[in-house]
Amino acid sequence: MPGVAVMQVPRSWLERIGRPPDDLGPGAFTQERPAIRLNAGAARCVSEPMKPKTHKRSPLLNRTAGAAAALLLGGGGLAAVNVHASAGTSSDDGDRREGAVVQQASTIACPEVVDRLRKVPERSRLEADRNLAQLDTQIGDAYERLVRNRAEAERDPGWAQNAVLGPLADKRRATIERIRTALERVGQDPVGLENLARCGMKDGGTPRPDGGQYGGDQDGAQGDGGQQDGQDGGQGDGGQDGGGQGDGAPPAGPSPEDFVDIKSVEPNAEDPGRQEDASTGTFNSDCGVNENGKFNSDNVIAAPGVSNGAHHMHDYTGNQDTNAFSTDDSLARGETSCVNQEDQSTYYWPVLRALNAGDGQDLDEPGGGQDGNVGTILQPTEVTLEFQGSPVGDVVEMPRFLRIITGDAKSFANGPANANASWSCTGFEDRQLADKYPLCPENSQVVRKFEFQSCWDGRNTDSANHRTHMDFANEDGSCDNGFVAVPKLVQRIVYDVPEGPNFAVDSFPEQLHKPVTDHGDFINVMSEGLMSEAVDCINNGRDCD
């Protein structure tokens, strides 16, 4: 195919849709996540090479990569993939129809711009972060418009491209250009950002019985189009085109197939073997279960200075000052819910909601009903915050104000490269799920577990994409060259949930509340003395709190 690389797809996906894998020839299959780019004038998805990531997947994700690939691609993929049309030719409509695999499209998938940012100077970081948050708002607005006009989309196969994807690409292009300009002003050369404006459609699975998920056959890969050159308008068009009920984004997802009986899962949890020099101690911080009811839809790590930067509600323990406008200084002055008052760290994660228990108190609020997150927020029955050692040696102290994000809130659209979700049930925690919600038996509770990256680059408390300053340990527990082992934070959160598939984690609207999008956030604001005490306990094999 001269001039174009057709999207590489897993062999299992083609087998599921009934297309012989040999049709594509050698080199067509990969587990690497493509950066989605839609080629004007042809219904096909082409691949932009992504820069290699410096971090590794968690052990659980490595073991469940095949299952995640089945969910993310085998379960839908883009709305249309043309496996025959070649670039440089104008394939006629008949060829496109014959070669295309058209599936029901239910959500919008866009390339993740932040993954291309490896170095952003401090004086440009705020502008970059604000524009990155604007990209999230634009996707959410476009998704809302798509859902509210489902009838129009079903009647006209070209409606989604002309009325949603084209205008979205124009808005994204203008915002990405602002990011590129900001970086060029400080001598950075952000190669390839301009190729990330275009988005496609992605199947989200079977709609819930309550009708809470959009469906319709769309050919969303028709190019870039649109009639709004240079327009950025952060408020979007959602809710202004008819077909909707009430204000805010309609709820969508999860799908029934996002749930699995935990008893049907084979044990899969493994720990790396400990070497003789392992640091075997633990340090626990008791910070409660958010009895103070601290919630907001901000994300001070990924979207500082932006209200509702997460587009979903977060549960907080620890530092009570945390919001979009928190600084190191304000966090250092903040009160804490932790029993040890020297731990002013911020621990937060998306809330879990009961979907059969009403709309909740935040139905009309950002991060709640306005962003498609509905249902009663469930308070955890137990939260454990444990810092563990390294299987191969001592750990060193975390720097104060170190920021860590584990998991990926957009992993349904982005693919599993940064995913680190882990779901289970009490009594069955040797069975961990990365891409399914567990259905627990009677007297068993749902468990969310976040094992954070534990290898630090030794220099930075944050990075441009909020990831590359930290890394997961290798399978044997060691850190790569240039990284040192720090205490590994393990968050374990336990819930009583409604019976059946009636709960879901909050998410960006277009991520459809998929379990693979679960994630956790941490900012270390322990005093230097307390961190030193924690490291001493861990390295000397003691269990402390």
Image (cartoon, rainbow, N blue to C red):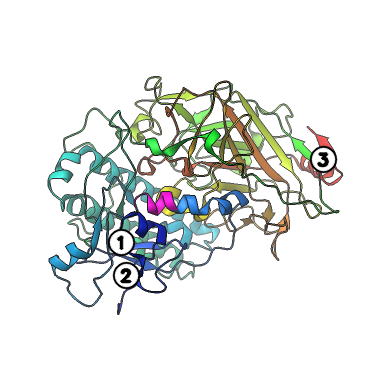
Q: Which amino acid type corresponds to the residue marked 2 in the rendered image?
A: Asp
Residue furthest to the bottom = 2
Is label 3 or label 2 in front?
A: 2
Is residue 10 shown to the viewer in this render? no
Magenta residues span 70-76
Q: Which residue is mark 2?
A: 23
Image quadrant occupied by the N terminus: bottom left
How far separated are the C-alphas under marks 2 and 1?
Answer: 8 Å
Q: Which amino acid type corresponds to the residue marked 3 in the rendered image?
A: Glu
Rendered view: 401 above or below 121 = above
Is residue 290 shown to the viewer in this render? yes
> Mark 2–mark 1 contact, CB under 8 Å?
yes
Residue 533 is labelled as 3
**Residue 385 as seen in the image, left or right of residue 275:** left
**Residue 329 as seen in the image, left or right of residue 83:** right
Q: Which residue is mark 1?
A: 19
Image quadrant occupied by the C terminus: top right
